[in-house]
Structures are given as structure tokens and as C-alpha cells.
Amino acid sequence: MAVEYNCILIRFGEIFLKGDNRKYFESLLIKNINDALKGIKYTFVRSQGRYYIEKYLPEDKDEIISRLTKVFGIHSVSPTVKVPTDIEELGKVAAEIAPKSGKFRVTVKRADKRLGMTSTEFAASIGGKLLKASGGKLKVDLFDYDFELFVDIRENGYSYLFYDKIMGAQGLPTGCSGNGMLLLSGGIDSPVAGYVMAKRGIRLFAIHFHSFPYTSELALQKVKDLAKKLTAYCGEIKLFVVPFTEIQYAIHDKCPEEFMITIMRRFMMRIAERIARANNCGAIITGESLGQVASQTMQSIIVTNSVVTLPVYRPLIGSDKSEIIDIANKIDTFEISIRPYEDCCTVFLPKNPVIKPKLSDAEEFESRLDVDALIEKAVAETAEEIITPGQE
Amino acid sequence: MIYFDNAATTRASETTVETVSEYLREKFYNPSSLYHEGIEAKRDLDKARSTILEKLRADGKVIFTGGGTESDNIALFGSKKHKNGRIIIGGAEHAAIYASAAELKQRGYDVVLAPVDSSGKVIAERFAELLTPEVTFVSVMHVNNETGAVNDVAALAESVKRVAPKAIFHSDGVQAFGKMKLNLRSTAIDLYSLSAHKLGAPKGLGALYIRSGVSVSPIVFGGGQEGGLRSSTENTAAIAAFRKAAEERYGDLDATRAAVSAIRARIIEVLGSIEEIKILSPENGSPYILTFSSRKVRGEVMQHALEREGVLIGTGSACSSNKASERIPEALGLKDKYRDGIVRLSFFKDNTLSEADEFAGKYLKVYKELSKYGS
């Protein structure tokens, strides 16, 4: 019978560095792991600074690995064979799981000191069995090797064998850095910005401005689908959908055409801050990248930023489009972002938006509007939806 | 809710729903099985074929397919054509024809588009100019799905056969069948495509009429069903429902045409009050379709705004950024903002005059709001 990978080893990275907070970070990470594995049967084991997923159905193994590698805070995972510690058995399993040719080394970690052999002796013995089984196709090289077979001998009478290491999402456990309100437009950049900040431990909330009937239900669905993709990494997201048409009408009626976007953005920031504060968010997150469009010039950002006091995190400010697209592809949001629906919102976009708006101009034009009342109404009519990971 | 998007698809009638249910629950047997129940199912298939042939008033055969698009594909790819010959298609054909013809062009055929007038109807004189003895295949839709314009396919087929007697003439009859009287026997039409869900039967079923003596090769291979032309176990439930629907549509054809004509006329009258609206459907077009365009309000925006009022309509152009949807407005010669402003209303037997009035009221209200902001 073929050997089964009956255990998945989880290594966590940066949280080691966090000193006194380690306990808090770990409890968050464990919760996030359990959340990510919802719907799957397994046992979570915590032992000597490592986590193990055990007692799952063999057919769930790949799904578990796929989900774990999206959990922030996990450095890497390894499918592992857990066997009773017995030198013959270890050699047999090692020969079965290891690649059949190439250069290798065996590294043994021995917590169980009662076994009468040193780690080096264990390694030599297992390595010898591997060499023999390969019929000469494997070669030992302790320094320049193609793969490293690890054998972890534990005090509980079991050993863990593995050689494959799958990189995780890294970063910090979601939630350990607090809450952030992501402006999620449906474009390529904003989901990437959300991902990048979630990686630093931020629990995401998202806000979307909807211009029905100028944007369609499909455009809104696109935003929900994007949020859904993000939940694979950062867990559930509360999405706020703000009706924005009336505000656009008001700006269109009272303000110069070229200031449409600038003033729209100022409304969006104000509303985002209102809802962010109500949800204990310590920051607003946007996908802005300097100079990408008229509303993302240095002057435009001064004008749109000036209406809020919460910090605004713009993790992509120095990124090129191609760099952003690389991440979008990695997190599988790109294909969703390029669905064409958002273009239907072009109705209010001016032909020549102002590139270097002046704060005093924006403030003067805005004084023609009842800003507070417009915001009050939009916030009151905002819809909320919890986007959860996994199947519907 | 008012549903004026029946050219997209229709609600099934009670009888067709019952028929589907009966065939799924009781008469579910495979028509290729050799026991009695299978043979009965096969008989029912053949009955449906003959009903459809009778409604087409045609001799020849009918094969069932996976939909109108598949029927069109079998016509274009499965019919006998001479190598690198000329293929003519109408200038405002459905994507099923347009995309298939584009593929044939890639494969070396001389594909040309017959110019259409501003209603989407093929211009007979311009069509005649394209005819040469090298013509090997022609496809012109019977009723244009975007505007309801009715092509005189009988006359066009005649003119083709005079110049190129061996050419195959196909017509996409998806928006015509069940909605107008047909008499294919008296024409030179060789192939004619149908779709079940446009007349109250289920989706996923089409049919292709093939005139006697016209040779067609399969494009799907397998168990040899449908005379080897469309392998795959037949969708007996949908086919039986299609038969019922065809009987129903032709049973009350005159009354339905009169009813939808009245609806259409009522709405045209109301739209007449708006200066910047152009009616695109021709007066003598199919009464089931009414298409118009405004240069002030985009079709999709109007669609969404009416949706909120409980009115579902179709649009010509799904989105201005979607290149594929610009083909038809361009063929119709629409300029500038009229290209994005297309709205298509399409009616069916259940629609009423009071719905037309309710629509008119809501349309005018929404139009007034939206046109203020332009597009």
C-alpha cells in the first residue's frame, strides 16, 4: 500500500518575533486556521511550537493545503507522514515518499533521547536505506542537494517525515493589526490593496459606491465576487454598498464638470470614514497608485485626503500597473476585475478632469452643496452584507 | 412585473410545463431503446418532427439540436460548399451566424456581408450585386432579432438560385417561427433554423429544417441519433413541449398578432412625443418587436432604471465598451449617441394593452429624470 500523507505540518513565520504578544498572535492564527478549514473534518494539534493538521480524509489533503497556504501568518506547510518511531519503518517510508533520483540529504531532529542512536546515526541509517532502494539513482550530498528529507522524531513515540515545503501567504495573522476600511471599486487595484494590507494583519471591511441605474447589478456582483476572493486570505468581510447616484446628480448639477471626480472622491472619503469609525476601523485603505489617473496625482490626493482625519493606507502608491497585475493574478482577482461592467459608469465622467485641483476651488464648489445632508442620506441608505469564505 | 423582453426568451405556458413534467416523470425512456417504452418515445419524437414540418409547410426533414445557435452552426459548417467559394450573410445577422461565418472566412472562404437598411433589412438590389456563380452558401435571417425587420427570404433565395443554382440558402427563423405564417414549400430555402424557448418551450432545444435532397454532414459525432446529424440522446421532454408550443402558437396566431400589434402601436404613439427618439423597427416589421433609440439616455441605463420600476426590457448594446455589441448599431448606420441608446421591447401572447399603458407611463417618467443628466 502506498504511504499516505496523514499529517500536515504548519510553520509560522514572523509571529516568532513578537515577544510578549506571541500568545495573542498565536491564538488569532489558530482561530484563522480553524475558520479557513471550516467544512472539513480534521484534528488540530499544537506541539512544541508547531501546528499539525491530522485525522482528515485523504481526499481532503490538497484542499486543506490550498486553504492553509492562503492564511496570513503561515510561513509554509509540508505534507507529512506520521509513523511510529521504528528505524526499519522510517527507512521504508522515506524510500517511498522521496524522489527516485537526484542528490539529497537527510536531516533528523530527535526530541526523543531514549532511542540509543544520535541524530546523525539516524540520518545515516535512513539515508543508507534510501540509497539502497534507489538502485544507484540517488546520491548523497550534504551541501549541494536537490531535496532534503526531514525526519522529526518526537517524544510521543511518533516520527514525522517530509521533504516538500509549500510556501504560505506569510505576513501576520488577520486581525492582529486591527480593522481597515477598503474602498473596493471593482477595478484591478483595490482588491490588491486590500490583500496587501490584510497580509499585514488588518481585518478588512469594504465599501463600494453604487450608481444604479448607471451601474448594473452585475457590477455589484463583480465587487462581491472580488470580496469573496479576498476572504480566502483574510476571512469574512463586511461589505457596505452605498447608493451614490444622488450625490453624483447633485455634483453634476452644481459643480464644474472637470471637478466631478475630485468632489466625488471627497464624498467617498467622507462616507468611508464615517462608516469606518462606526466599525472601529483605524484606517482607510485605497488602491491609489501615484499618477495612474487624474484623481491619483499628488495634488488630487491632497484635495481628497483633506476631508478625513483617519490615516489612509495606500499600499500601491509606488507600484506600477504591471506589478499590481502580478499580485492580482496571484490572488485570482484579475479575471474578475477585467469584466467589462464598470465601464457602464462612465456617464458622469468629465472629458477633461482636473489634474492639479486646488483645495480652495474644491471647497468653494462644494459649498454649493448640502454636503452633510447628502452624506447623511447615503449613509442611512447603505446596505450591508457579510461576505464569507467557501461555498455559497 | 411587466416582461417586454420576449425576444430574449419566453415564459413557458402551463401546457408545456405539464408536458415536460410528464416526459421527465413517466415517459422518460430513451428513444433509441428497443423496448416498447423506447419505441413510444421515438414515435413521439417523430410526431413532433411532423408537427413542425407542418407548421413550416415544408417537405423534407427536421432534426433536433441543442438550440438555435447549434442549428445555425450545423447549417454553416455541415452543409456542402465548394472550396473557397463565396458565402453571403446578411449584414445584421445574429452572432451565431456572424461568428460562424467569420470562422469560415479564416478557413479560406470568400465571406461577404449583404448591406442592410436602417431597419436591419437586407437591401435586395445590393444583395443581387454580390451574387456570382461562385456563391456556395447564403444565410439571411427571416426576422431580425434586434429590430423585427422581416427579410423577403423567399425572393432572396430565388435570386440566389438563378445565379448559383447549387448554392445552399439558409435562413435563421428563430424570431419567425410561431410568430408568422410560413410556407417554405413554395420557396427555394434549403435550411431553416428554429429555437424552442422563443415560443414558450424550454431552453436548450433547437431544430434545423433540411429540404429533401440537401446534403448536410454532422458536426457532432457519436451514437448516430437524428439520422446521424446530431448525435446525443434526444431531449424528449423539451421536444414534446416544443411540439405543444408550436401547436399553441399557430392555433392562436392571428389573435396574438393582432394583440401584440396593438401593444406595439400604442407604444409607438407614446414615443412619438419625444423628439430625440428614433424608431428603428420598420412599420411592416414583426409586430412582436419594437426597437428604438434615444441619443439622450443610454439603453442600459434605461434598462436598469425600468427594472427598478418592475419593467424588464432588452437593450441593443449591452455596454459601450463591449466591441461585439457595436456591430449591429453600426450596420444600421446609427450615429454617435444613438448607438448606445438602443432599447428593444419584445412581446408575447400574454402581454396586454394595459401593460403597454403602464409601461408608457413609467417609461416617460423615468425618461424625463434620466434625460436631464444626458449620457
Image: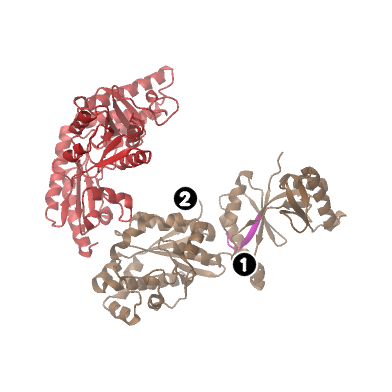
Q: Position of residue B162 (x, y in %)?
A: 20, 29
Q: Residue A36 carries which label?
A: none
Would you name the residue on which mark 2 appears? A392
Q: Which of A174 and B227 is in front in this view?
A: B227
Q: Residue furthest bottom?
A: A360
Q: Where is residue A205 in the image (x, y as percent from the top left)?
A: 46, 65
For residue A310, above or below residue A96: below
- The picture quadrant where one finds residue B139 is top left
Residue in the image at 70% along x and 41% along y: A2
Residue in the image at 12% along x and 52% along y: B272
Q: Look at chain A in the picture and name its colour.
A: brown
Residue in the image at 63% along x and 61% along y: A75
Q: Nearer the viewer, residue B189 or A53?
A: B189
Secondary structure state at the residue bearing disc 1 = helix
Would residue A189 be seen by someone viewing this image from the given angle? yes
Q: Over which residues does the magenta segment extend? A: A71-77
Q: Where is residue B294 in the image (x, y as percent from the top left)?
A: 19, 55
What's under tag 1, amino acid-wise? Phe
What's under tag 2, amino acid-wise? Glu
Rate crowding at label 1 as few (under 14), some (14 to 19) or many (20 or more) other CA atoms within 10 Å: many
Secondary structure state at the residue bearing disc 2 = loop
Both marks 1 and 2 on one chain:
yes
Q: In which quarter of the image is the N terminus of chain A?
A: top right
Chain to which mark 2 belongs: A
**Mark closest to the chain's N terminus, 1 or 2:** 1
Q: Look at chain B in the picture and name its colour.
A: red
In the visual, does A42 lie left or right of B301?
Answer: right
Q: How is the image coloured?
A: by chain
Would you name the residue on which mark 1 appears? A25
For residue A166, above or below residue A89: below
Whether A167 is among the magenta residues is: no
